[in-house]
Amino acid sequence: MSLLIRIVGGVAGAVALSSVTMAQGVLTEKNISLGLAKEIADVALDTCQKTGYAVSVTVINRAGLVVLQYRGDKANLHTIENSQRKAYTARTFRRPSGEWAAQVTS
C-alpha cells in the first residue's frame, strides 16, 4: 500500500510539474520599430500639412504605448492628447478611429 501511494504521488507530482513547465515559454510578437514609426508619423504630418491641417501625430505599439509623438507647427496644445487617444482607440478596436466613430454615431 505504501509503495502504491508513493507511485501515485510521484506520478501526480510529475504531472503537476510538467504542466507548470509546459505553461512557461517564450512568446515572439511583432512590434513597430522606431524607424517605421518615424516614417508613418512623417507621412501623416506631411499629408495633413499639405491639406492645411495643423495636427499632432502619435504612433503607438501593440501594447498601446507611445513610440513616437510629433506636435506639428501651429498645432494647438490639445492636439497632442487627442492624437494619442485616437491612436489608442484605433489600436484597441483594431481599425481606424474614423471607422469606429462612424459606427458609433450611426
Image (tube, grey):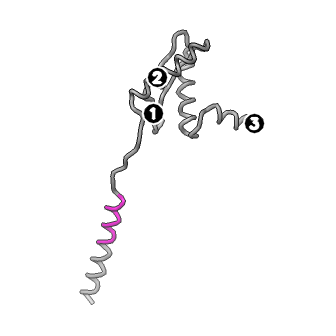
State the image coordinates of residue 74 (x, y, percent, origin top left): 55, 9
Q: Earlier in the sequence, mark 1 or mark 3?
A: 1
Q: How many marks?
A: 3
* Amino acid at dot 2: Gln
Q: What mark, if any, has residue 16 been given in the picture? A: none
Q: Is the magenta stretch mostly helix, strand or loop?
A: helix
In reply to whether residue 18 is colored magenta, the answer given is: yes
- Mark-to-mark CA distance, 1 and 2: 11 Å
Residue corresponding to mark 2: 69
Callout 1: few (<14), some (14-19), or many (20+) C-alpha neighbours within 10 Å?
Answer: few
In the rendered image, the residue lying farthest to the right is 106
Would you name the residue on which mark 3 appears? 106
> Disc 3 on helix, strand or loop?
loop
Residue 41 vs residue 8, the one in the foreground = 41
User: Mark 1 sits on what residue?
Assistant: 65
Instruction: Give the number of the mark in front: 1 or 3.
Output: 3
Q: Which stretch appears magenta?
A: 14-23
